[in-house]
Image: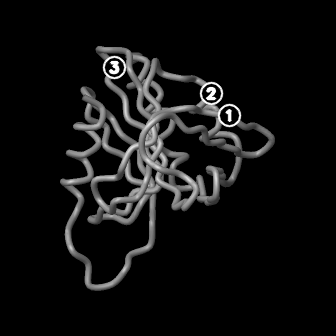
């Protein structure tokens, strides 16, 4: 279900671009499945995404940092760091439908530590075996509290 939902989101934003666009934070506050993602608007270039299904009390975190050391199948771990906080997450290593690369998809209950990290510093570092990306959090800051409320079913 989560892969389908993320695939739908990626399909909705996938359109050919004449030139590569800069990545930015995009928030969709759909109460049934809110999503906060970092990528190039109107493209399939999504580097990081957090989505929730509040009624089912489920959250999905997806990272798509390029790495030649990961292959699909099985599980993989990545580390998120912001400020002095960090969090190791383990999920399924899956083939990205958009570009054939490998993404790590973590499914579970809403994790307060993910939201804390998104508030913990000026940037978020995503460290995977064989790859690392640092992304600014300033564009996410106005949306994190709303996403957290929606994910936990709070008003």
> On the image, numbered disc 3 is attached to which residue?
54
For this orientation, the residue located farthest to the right is: 84
**Would you say 152 lies left or right of 114 here?**
left
> On the image, numbered disc 2 is attached to which residue?
113
Q: What residue is rendered at 36% in x and 40% in y? A: 35
Cβ atoms at labels 2 and 3 below 8 Å apart: no
Residue 49 image offset from top left, x and y in percent: 43, 45
For marks 2 and 3, give the CA distance: 17 Å
Above or below: residue 22 compared with residue 29: below
Location of residue 123 (image quadrant): bottom right
State whether residue 124 appears in this view: no
Q: Earlier in the sequence, mark 3 or mark 1?
A: 3
Above or below: residue 40 compared with residue 94: below
Above or below: residue 62 compared with residue 150: below
Depth check, mark 1 against mark 2: the one in front is 1
Q: SS for tag 1?
A: strand
Q: Earlier in the sequence, mark 2 or mark 3?
A: 3
Task: In the rendered structure, find residue 87 and report the number of the disc placed on it.
Answer: 1
Depth check, mark 3 against mark 1: the one in front is 1
Q: Earlier in the sequence, mark 1 or mark 2?
A: 1
**Would you say 154 lies left or right of 65 here?**
left
Cβ atoms at labels 1 and 2 below 8 Å apart: yes
Residue 138 image offset from top left, x and y in percent: 58, 55
């Amino acid at each position: 279900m989560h892969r389908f939902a993320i695939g739908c989101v990626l399909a909705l934003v996938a359109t050919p671009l004449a030139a590569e666009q800069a990545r930015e934070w995009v928030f969709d506050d759909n109460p049934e499945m809110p999503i906060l993602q970092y990528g190039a608007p109107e493209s399939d270039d999504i580097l990081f995404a957090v989505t929730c299904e509040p009624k089912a009390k489920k959250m999905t975190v997806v990272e798509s940092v390029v790495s030649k050391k990961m292959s699909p199948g099985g599980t993989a771990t990545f580390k998120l760091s912001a400020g002095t906080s960090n969090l190791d997450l383990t999920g399924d290593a899956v083939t990205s439908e958009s570009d054939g690369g490998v993404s790590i998809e973590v499914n579970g209950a809403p994790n307060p530590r993910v939201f804390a990290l998104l508030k913990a510093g000026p940037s978020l570092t995503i460290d995977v075996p064989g790859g690392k990306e640092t992304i600014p959090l300033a564009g996410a800051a106005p949306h994190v509290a709303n996403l957290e409320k929606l994910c936990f079913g709070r008003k």
